[in-house]
Image (cartoon, rainbow, N blue to C red):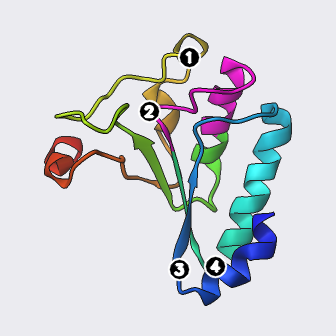
Amino acid sequence: AIASSVADITAAGYEGVMFDVEEVEGSSGTMVPAFAKAFAAVKRAGLRVAVTTSHSAPYQCDTPEDAVAFVKAWAADANIDILSPQLYSSGSEGSPEYAETNSCKAAGCTWDLYKGAHAAIAPSIVDAAMNDEVH
């Protein structure tokens, strides 16, 4: 669906698309190729591609293993420019939360999935004052 909207996104003056992926319905076998197709369409339009997710991986997926597969695919996808794990839960934290996503941690959705990622890692934080804590 996003492929048909990239012209409108570009015409509106946007420089990129941020995919906020916290809940995913559908298996990784179905959704990884769908995400990859969307990322490629956005990139082909000359836009930046960014993905943000809850802590280390989406917190709601069909299975914990799907959450792991999504992050592995994103880390390997050369069409993604920025991966932005959310280091907060409520938005009122006084410091970044480095906890891994609890719903899939036992399946392996740890911070190690981000090692070697093609994309820049730019954590989402509550306040710019936390910037020094995450760099």
Spatial distance from mark 4 to mark 3, Cα to Cα?
6 Å
User: In which quadrant of the rendered view does residue 49 lie?
Assistant: bottom right
Label 3 SS: loop
Cα separation between marks 4 and 1: 34 Å
Are the residues tagged 4 and 3 within 8 Å (C-beta)? yes
Sequence-first tag of 1 and 3: 3
The three-letter code of the residue at mark 2 reads His
Sequence-first disc among 2 and 4:
4
Q: Residues within 10 Å of mark 3 (few under 14, many from 20)?
A: few
Q: Which residues are magenta?
A: 53-72
**Mark 1 or mark 4, which is nearer the start of the sequence?**
4
- Label 4: which residue? 9
Indicate the quadrant containing the N terminus: top left, top right, bottom left or bottom right: bottom right
Q: Amino acid at mark 4?
A: Ile
Based on the displayed image, in which of its 4 quarters is residue 71 positioned? top right
Callout 4: helix, strand or loop?
helix
Instruction: Tell me the number on the disc at residue 123.
Output: none
Q: Which residue is mark 1?
A: 103
Q: Residue furthest right?
A: 30
Which residue does the numbered mark 3 point to in the structure image?
14
Residue 97 x, y percent position in the rendering: 29, 29
Q: With respect to residue 25, does 108 lie above or below?
A: above
Question: With respect to residue 107, does 77 lie above or below?
Answer: below
Find disc 2 in the rendering and name its residue.
Answer: 55
Measured in 3D between alpha carbons, the distance from the residue under mark 2 to the one under mark 4, in whole angstroms, is 27 Å
Residue type highlighted by circle 1: Ser
